[in-house]
Image (cartoon, rainbow, N blue to C red):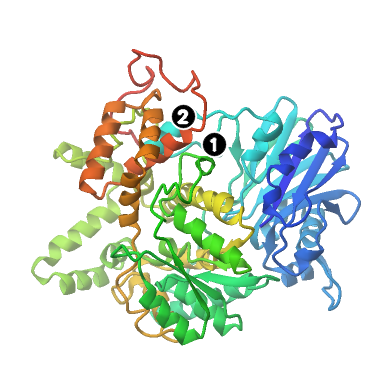
Amino acid sequence: MSGILALVDLRGDALDIESARPHLDAIAHRGDRQPVLWSGGPAVLGHVNLPTTAEAEHEALPATFDGRHWITWDGRLDNRDDLARRLGIQLRAGEVTTDAELVAAAYAQWGTDFVEHLLGDWAVVIWDAHERRLVCAKDPLGWRSLYWAKQGNRLMAGTEPRQFFAGGFLERRPNHDYLLRFLADALQQPNTTCYDGLSELLGGQVLTAHRGCVSVHTYWDRPRTRRLPRGARPEEYVEEFRALFAEAMRARLRTNRKVGVFLSGGLDSSYIAAIAAEQGTKPLAFTVFNPATRWMDERNYAAMVVDHLGLEQQLVDISDGWSLSSAVLGDETFDSPAQPPQAPAHVALARAAAANGVGVVFGGEGADEWLTGMPAIESEVRELRLISAWRMARTRRKGNASLLFARAAYSAYLPFALRNRIRELRGRQGCPVQPFVNTHRGWKHGLTYELAGGWSDGERLRRTWVLYRQHAGLTIGWRDRWAFGVNRNELRTPFNDLRLVEFLASVPESEKRFRGRRKDILREAEYAVLPRAIPDRDDFGLYSELLVDGARRESARREAALAALARVDGVDRRAVREEVDRWLADDHEGWEPNWRAITAGAWLGTFPAPASLYRQPGQRPGPASMKRKEVITQ
């Protein structure tokens, strides 16, 4: 985890290097070395280095290795040997070839197609001094942050939004359309952010600035599936999963820092700890608990894993870790409409890791999305394994197998838009928009967008990925800025390895539940390395008690947030109040829209009241182009 900066004059005029210094100083906390700037005519590049591999200790970026291409980057390359072989570079013992040097050589060899040859987690900026071309790119999954903005004849790229406001490159203004879409859980416009004028480069994209023109090209927009052998046994999927996960762990254990793992005792983090130990690294285990809750105390399971693997453990008490906790979270941490409910726990874990000298920590993110699997009968119907689906239906509900089979076929084959319309005609609620948000007819509600993918597996997968990136990206970005970035430790998530993601996207959904349980592939792999009580567990830790408890406890923060939100054009303040009060009283399952309302309001409270966002006294909620109705989807 490092930080990068690029500032370019698109007309070709020379830039003063000192004009870029405030933008780089804004993220100086991300590194343990002095921030470095380089200037070359119309371009200024910057780098803040937190080396988390032995090779990165030797990276003095920005740098050029051929006198033409200058590079600054934040990343880890996982296919060093293979890439060096294709480039004709020999990696000799005793000589250090950095990841950045290999990436720069790849760009010199293949141009913007170099992205197809890199494997790992990375964000990179390259300046071609001869062509006067700037190239910014991210790996396909894209969990390293990279933002950009154009102001007049200048283009800027950087790791965090705060860089753009330091020094006044951009005025810090909220994006009204983004905010309302966020509140409605609607699909966002590509590359937009919560700040007006600021764009985010997504995973699988390349930005090019050349001769005054700026363009963004997408080279990857979904996991690239492959056709697996038809009729493969579950054991074959388990074996390939084991092999790929071992490779993902081996790549992420390449580090010069002390290693830790956020160990809940659940399926995901326990397997990470087991494979790390199997490969010769025993991470320091950090386990959070809150003794006052029923569901946020998994110390018994974590203890089984620690004892079995012979690990050291650090228990982290989050008694003050309720959501919105003013004891943990300052107002500055509300720098976007989205803040994860578990934010205080993330901060507590990152602080504990830093206090124990841990520089690289492992987490289980990605496992839920790629390993859970859909209900088996519907999956079998979708895969046209109708005899198998019928047998499952008869086994699971002997008295009404025909109805169960028909429902599975209905869900698998009938377009979602038509199913949704049928529900409406029958008097049932379709895909709802939260009642306090006035929505535009052209918006697409997230769930509707995903389920309306039709019969094409590729299109369904693309939509699933778009939504996963939109939702997970907000949480990952927040943690990078306010948990790990400020504590100078790097989170690594092996379940988000590209090779593993594309394999699991290729596995039929029913095979992920081949024994009828969620994550059966992972459970089967765990029997060889963990006590049986771990893969056999059906319960899991829940943060929900601390979620509603925090919203109740932090009444001053909550009320200030709701007051800020109530003045926004397009939001019905009476409906907001009714919905939030009902949730706080009943603690019902529909917490998400209320949580979005509170965190968005807390973010708005960090701004002065802009006339462009707030309606005037007496004005009715919502612009004329908006109507209170359900979202129309395509």
Q: Amino acid at mark 1?
A: Thr
- Mark 2 and mark 1: Cα distance apart in space: 10 Å
Q: Can residue 162 be spotted in the picture?
A: yes
Which quadrant holds residue 210?
top right
Spot occupied by residue 37 in the image (x, y as percentages of width and height): 82, 45
Q: Is residue 527 found left or right of 279 in the rendered image?
A: left
Between 188 and 263, the one nearer to me in the picture: 263
Q: Position of residue 145 (x, y in %)?
A: 61, 49
| Residue located beneath label 1 in the image | 192
Badge 2 vs badge 1, beta-carbon distance below 8 Å:
yes
Mark earlier in primary sequence (2, 1): 2
Question: Which residue does the image show at 37% across and 27% down from the upper left?
Answer: 440
Q: Nearer the viewer, residue 12 or 340?
A: 340
Secondary structure category for the residue under label 1: loop
For label 2, the SS is: helix
Q: Which residue is mark 2?
A: 177
Q: Amino acid at mark 2?
A: Asp
